[in-house]
Image (cartoon, rainbow, N blue to C red):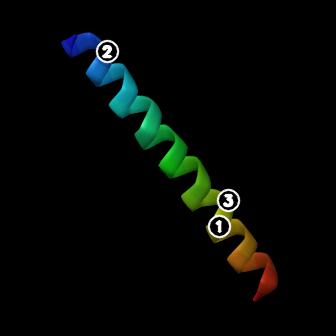
Amino acid sequence: MMVSVIVGFRRLLHCFFFFHVRDEGLFFLVH
């Protein structure tokens, strides 16, 4: 159970980081 929670949290954090970097890149290209 705990391992599943940790894996899910890491996956969520990775997705959030990926989208944040992508948005930052688009913001940089637009401006």
Crowding near the residue tagged with mark 3, few <14, some 14–19, many ≥20 C-alpha atoms within 10 Å: few
Q: Residue 20, located in which quarter of the rendered image? A: bottom right
Q: Amino acid at mark 3?
A: Arg
Please state if 29 lies on the left or on the right of 8 as rendered. Answer: right
Tell me whether the residue at label 3 lies in contact with that at label 1, contact meaning CB atoms closer than 8 angstroms. yes
Image quarter of the N terminus? top left
Q: Which mark is residue 23?
A: 1
Mark pair 3, 1: CA separation: 4 Å
Q: Is residue 1 above or below residue 18?
A: above
Q: Is residue 29 above or below residue 14?
A: below
Q: Is residue 13 above or below residue 1?
A: below
Q: Residue at x 38, y 26 (%)?
A: 8
Q: Residue 29, located in which quarter of the rendered image? A: bottom right
Percent coordinates x, y for residue 15 in the rendering:
53, 42
Q: Secondary structure at mark 1?
A: helix
Q: Secondary structure at mark 3?
A: helix
* Labels 2 and 1: the sequence-earlier one: 2
Crowding near the residue tagged with mark 1, few <14, some 14–19, many ≥20 C-alpha atoms within 10 Å: few
Q: Residue furthest bottom?
A: 31
Image quarter of the C terminus? bottom right
Mark pair 2, 3: CA separation: 27 Å
Q: Secondary structure at mark 2?
A: helix
Please state if 28 lies on the left or on the right of 2 as rendered. Answer: right
Mark 2 lies on residue? 4
Q: Closer to us: mark 2 or mark 1?
A: 2
Q: Which mark is residue 22?
A: 3
Percent coordinates x, y for residue 4 in the rendering:
31, 15
Percent coordinates x, y for residue 2 in the rendering:
19, 14
Q: Residue furthest left?
A: 2
